[in-house]
Amino acid sequence: MVSVEQFSELVRAARSCRRYVEADPMPPALVRRLVDIARLVPSGGNQQPLRYRIVTDATERGRVFPYLRWAAALKDWAGPAEGERPTAYIVILSPADKPSHTDVGIAAQTIQLAATAMGYAACMVGSIDRPAVRHELRLPDDLEIQLIVALGRPGEKIVLEELARGGDVSYWRTPDGVHHVPKRRLEDVLIK
């Protein structure tokens, strides 16, 4: 088991990374390992409704990338440039007639934490052109895309900032490319 201090550091390190080292791809076996870990998480009623589609092939990645939207708060940034793009994706799906947002969140966070523990980074992408990705990956009609987790070797520095009470939660980048993420203080999220 890990200590609570080690776990806290893992959570602090597991940021939404949007720039990767494309020249250092994540091995497909490690991506498969992430799904193997995610399949073990708790599930509502133990229904285990989630299905996963791994995308590691460069051609397939190239077909998925145009249909993802990155970092809405960074208005002047179109997303990762060539050389900075994810080297793997995990598409998380659930039955079309039974979406399970709680299970999706649990699985996605587990994937992100495990990727970080392996020395990789992740970004949970919810802004997706779902019909286009479904078409490109030939996904079954009875499953709905819930989320895509982008993965790769981190290619950016991300710093957490303590947010002043009433401050702006929008993240930003400095001219040197450091990504700053404001986080509310504990006192501001606890309700008495």
Image (spheres, rainbow, N blue to C red):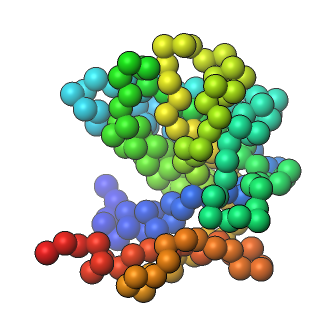
Residue found at the far bottom of this picture: 164
**Residue 31: horizontal and vertical position, in percent?**
59, 37
Q: Quadrant of the N terminus?
A: bottom left
The tally of labels here is 0
At horizontal 63% and vertical 58% (from top left) the residue drawn is 72
Q: Position of residue 70 (x, y in %)?
A: 67, 53
Splitting the image into 4 quarters, where does residue 155 fall? bottom right
Front residue of 165 and 64: 165
Identity of the residue drawn at 29% across and 33% down:
43
- Residue placed furthest toward the top: 141
User: In this rendering, is residue 79 above or below 101?
Assistant: below
Q: Identify the residue shown where x is 37% and y is 63%.
A: 7
Q: Is residue 61 left or right of residue 97?
A: right
**As drawn, 11 above or below 63:** below
Q: Residue at x 35, y 71 (%)?
A: 5
Q: Nearer the viewer, residue 153 or 173?
A: 173
Residue situated furthest left in the rendering:
192
Q: Is residue 167 visible?
A: yes
Quadrant holding the C terminus: bottom left
- The picture places residue 144, in percent across and down from the top left corner, at 50, 24
